[in-house]
Image (cartoon, rainbow, N blue to C red):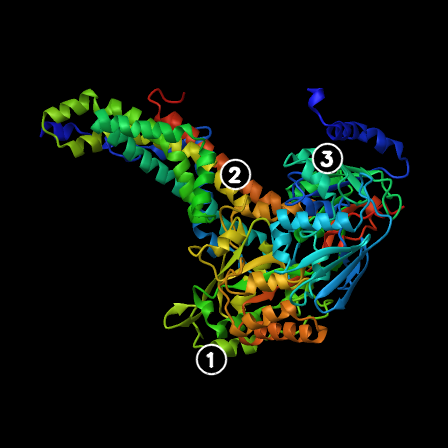
Amino acid sequence: MILTLSRRALLAGAAALALPMAVAADDAHPPLRMVTSFTINSMDPWTQGFWMQEFGQAELLMQFRDDGAHHPWLLEALDKPEPTRWVMTLRDGITFQNGKPVDAQAVLAAIEAAIANSASARGSVPEGAVFSVTGPLELSVTTPEPWPELPGVLADESVFLILDAEAVAEVGEDWAQLIGAGIYTGPYEVTALDETRMVAVAHEGYWQGKPALPGLTLAFVPDANARILALQNDEADIALYPPLAARPAVDATPGVHFNLGALATGGFTGFMNLQQGLLADATLRKAVLRATDFREIAEDVFRGGVAQATSLYAQNLPFALENYTTDLSEAAALLDEAGWVPGPDGIRRRDGQRLALTLAIYPQQPDLVPLSTAVQAQYARLGIEANVVSFDGINQALMEPSNRWDIAMVSSGAASWGRVQNFLNSYLLPGGRRNYGGYDNAEVNALVPELATEADPDRRRAILHRVQEILWEEDPFAFSYNIHLDRVIVNDRYACYPPGFALYHVSWLTAPCE
Amino acid sequence: MLMRTRLPERTLILPPDGLVRKMMRHPSGGWGLALVVALAVVALFGPWLAPHPPNLPDYANALRGPGPGHWLGTDATGRDQLSRLLDGARRSLGGAVLVGVAITLIGMIMGILAALAGRWVDAALMRFVDVVMALPGLIVAFAVIGLLGPGYGNLLIALIAADWAYKARIARACAFEAVRSPAATVARQIGVPEWRVVLHHVLPPVFWPLLVLGTLGLGGQIAAISAFSFLGLGVQVPHAEWGAMLAESRFMFTIAPWLLIAPAACIFLSVLASNLLGEALRDLATPEGRS
């Protein structure tokens, strides 16, 4: 049996066994203990690899930061000498955790492997794009049309992780062999992964310097209450994805802290159903938007744990058009104009039909319970009855025509990693895989493809402003109820830990406060 | 004619004479009956007794402790806890009663039909019952909710689907004996119509055991409705239900324990009441008296 094991598998096993010793040997800080709600199912880099970027194992060529801009990361520079050609220059001296150099050839192999194996990567690359090596540390990509979103694509964790493609190809689909294989470039290397936790140890040869921690363990704990209790019982240092409902209790508990961070790139988004029910009427949709009290949602419902939505996009993004206002009298006038008049019970009626809407939420987001409760009360002020239905597996449920709903409340990112195209293509265009409500606006249908190849920043901003105007003023469909703030619960040791922006939870500098 | 006078009215499905009086004398029956009556009043008149609108948020008064104005405090959105408990009673208790009645009726019909028809109808119905009983009730309930979707109505259907087979099996056993009893046989021989035989000789021996079982099972139904609502599969927001109220407040135990204690106490009292009443009924229904 031993004879059939590869040298890599033996090394991986040895590394896993050596972990406690390695951890004990570093007396500066104990390893970081994190708990998260999601399980990393395997080392499959094409479907699970994005987690590795979040917890310090894998890295990307670019990084999206809270200034709303993309910055080179493994790249030293990203230049656009011609409208249809980008040049990527790699930093010198970077190696994979297994010691192999990260040169242009290795990066090209990683990109090609991603395009071959990952649907997300394939979907992000425009047709006709050609990647080529133009120097030892230089690659170029040429496209038939300008590709303005390339910086965002290179910063998106689900597209091009930089990995040792040769080592990945060698294991076939026996992903467990990648444990300890050092296929990524990040500060921490995976040494164990099972259904309950992932363990990683510091990669001493990390290109920016020695990581601050000897390692980390990431436990998979789906229940939010259990994650909070893990912190209170000193079984974890950082708990990810805490529900905002837990904030008052956490704030009142000594030794644990509810840390809020920067504006995220998304929030709870409302999608209206134009295919069935009353919201086919644009006037009613406009009234619903104006009846939504965005201030109350941010300040009263979530007690400042989210930012007030003033636009479809987060306020720090340069293309956000801050056009949201709450105006009950305008909303009432719109409903009057559409023939909806208050009935004896306060609910409006037209031709005997009650103005009743169904809000769709899902159990995986417990914060949708207080949000939907608040929205029901807000709409009731205007004479709109709102009932709530909870769907398990919201994306499938909303695309299923037999399910009745009028407004879906979904946590989504309108500009994840600074990329706007994905959201617009998927959610707003006819045939988009998440166009839940059957939105089909001729002008939006023309603007979105134009944006995909428009390189001029001013014109891009103008297009995005126009889309936001249409979505508020003329033909409403998707809107933000709030903008999320990154958030975590931490113990005293990590009281100064800032929640990771754009899901970068662990960097080489992550360390206890002292 | 003679037989007509010999068919006593007490064999119909009517409370035996002095049942309430006997119940009050029973060590646990009195308490059970008193609790059930009190809970029934709350369930029936809860919405009218509620001092505040149960679903209306009042953020300025969020997480207030028990005191004047809000005798059981307020929740994280400022809703009055007492009003929500009163409003939620009809869903927690009413739903359990509805499920109990439905499974008793279904079980009774299936059981009596099998016993009366006999042969292949009996065999087919009982094999079907065996198949359903072979599946754990919890799995059946989850499967039905998965099929129909979450919601209070669907939850009740799921609980009925999960629990009727056991009652059918009991009903068939009781009915099988009753259909072939000497009294039923004699009644048929003298020309009493079959429906009267069923009404007077089959139904009573089936009904009373099922009533006792149903009452004893009521606590389980209350707990099941609460548990499924706790998981988000039952009552949907913003409506109150005791299990759902526990779920909504589970993060608040350290700072607002009243939000969990009150609905938990209501669930406990309801289960206790149904168990006490069920035990008393069982004792009174047993021929030898208390067993």
The residue carrying mark 3 is A179
| Image-based side of A471 in relation to B163, left or right | right
Q: Secondary structure at mark 3?
A: loop
Marks counted in the figure total 3
Q: Quadrant of residue A238?
A: top right
In x, y percent, where is residue A43?
A: 68, 39
Q: Amino acid at mark 1?
A: Glu
In x, y percent, where is residue B149?
A: 46, 48
Tell me the subunit letter for badge 3.
Answer: A
Q: Are marks 3 and 2 on the same chain?
A: no
The residue carrying mark 2 is B269
For the residues bearing labels 3 and 1, Cβ distance under 8 angstroms? no
Residue B291 visible in the displayed image: yes
Q: Can you say whether B95 is above or below A431 in the image? A: above
Question: Which mark, by number, is residue A337?
Answer: 1
Tell me the subunit letter for badge 1.
Answer: A
- Tell me the mark number nearer the camera, choosing from 2 and 1: 1
Q: Quadrant of residue A183?
A: top right
Q: Are marks 2 and 1 on the same chain?
A: no
